[in-house]
Amino acid sequence: MINYHPSIETLTDYAAGSLPLAHSLCVSTHIEHCSECQQQIRKLEMLGTHLFEQAKTEKRRLDSLKDSFFQKLAELPEQDILKKEQTATEPEQSWKDEYRIPRSLRQFIKSSYDDLNWMRLSPSFKIATLYNEEGGAQVALTRVKAGAHMPTHTHTGDEITLVLEGAFSDESGVYRQGDFINRDASHKHKPIVTKDAECICLTVLDAPIEFTGWLTRLLNPLIRRHHPYSPH
């Protein structure tokens, strides 16, 4: 069961096409397997069309338009959404399909996670970069062995994490397949992977993370050097 989702503001920007490309990729991967957010997107698309037509004949302030948008979003019947979902032609994949590559990531991962160019940062933790926005965000995969932990770190910018395989926990909760977690520069945490399986996550980093351990700090220059936001 998926317990953590993108915010309604993030979904609204995604539906409107105004979300940055790297962030859209992460949201798209989450939506691919989340029926709750699929319904929200259908609502947003329907309401966006309705309000666009309404705006042609009415003059309204931006704030009142936004208030009306979210009010109607909460009131829209679920059955209207389900009717549209029944028209889908491609069968929905399940997170239970072990190591099955999400459709949204197949442009970067052709057959297997093992085929990627992994950079090992510790005996139990490695990372593979999928895409760098010039001067912007980095899209990457992290892979941590079962029962191991990622070094304690802080964020110098926003970080989105989507669990693809396995599960992990930190001071704020437990996150399993499909969960969408958003962190900002105020967070400092030490993710620990559950003992039953390794954990693979899709991450979007607006700026490099900073390891805080006395030994792992030595990795920070390497992390900064591989992030598009960092000066070279």
Image (cartoon, rainbow, N blue to C red):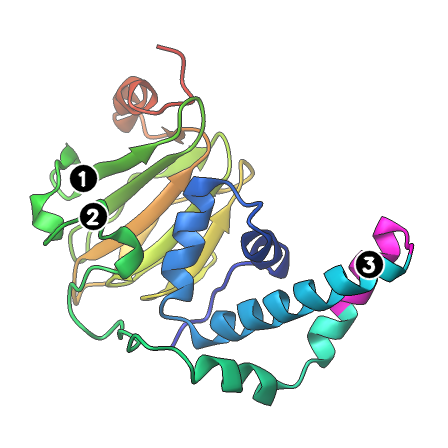
Q: Amino acid at mark 1?
A: Lys
Residue at image position (79%, 57%) is 66
Q: Position of residue 81 (x, y in %)?
A: 56, 81
Which of 148/12 is in front?
A: 12
Label pair 2/1, CB-CB below 8 angstroms: yes
Q: Amino acid at mark 2?
A: Arg
Q: Residues within 10 Å of mark 3 (few under 14, many from 20)?
A: few
Crowding near pointer 1: few (<14 within 10 Å), some, many (20+)? some
Q: Which residues are magenta?
A: 59-70
Q: Name the secondary structure under disc 1.
A: strand
Relative to 30, is 124 on the left or the right? left
Regarding mark 3 in the picture, which secondary structure is present there?
Answer: helix
Disc 2: which residue: 143
Task: Check disc 1 and report the residue beneath it.
Answer: 126
Residue lying at 20% horizontally and 59% vertically, measured from the top left: 101
Query: Which residue carries the number 3 mark?
Result: 55
Q: Secondary structure at mark 2?
A: strand
Q: CA–CA distance between discs 3 and 1?
A: 50 Å
Looking at the image, the residue that sits furthest to the top is 232
Q: In this rendering, is residue 4 above or below 18?
A: below
Q: Residue 78 magenta-drawn?
A: no
Instruction: Tell me the chief SS of the magenta region.
Output: helix
Circle 3 or circle 1, nearest the eye: 3
Q: Quadrant of the N terminus?
A: bottom left
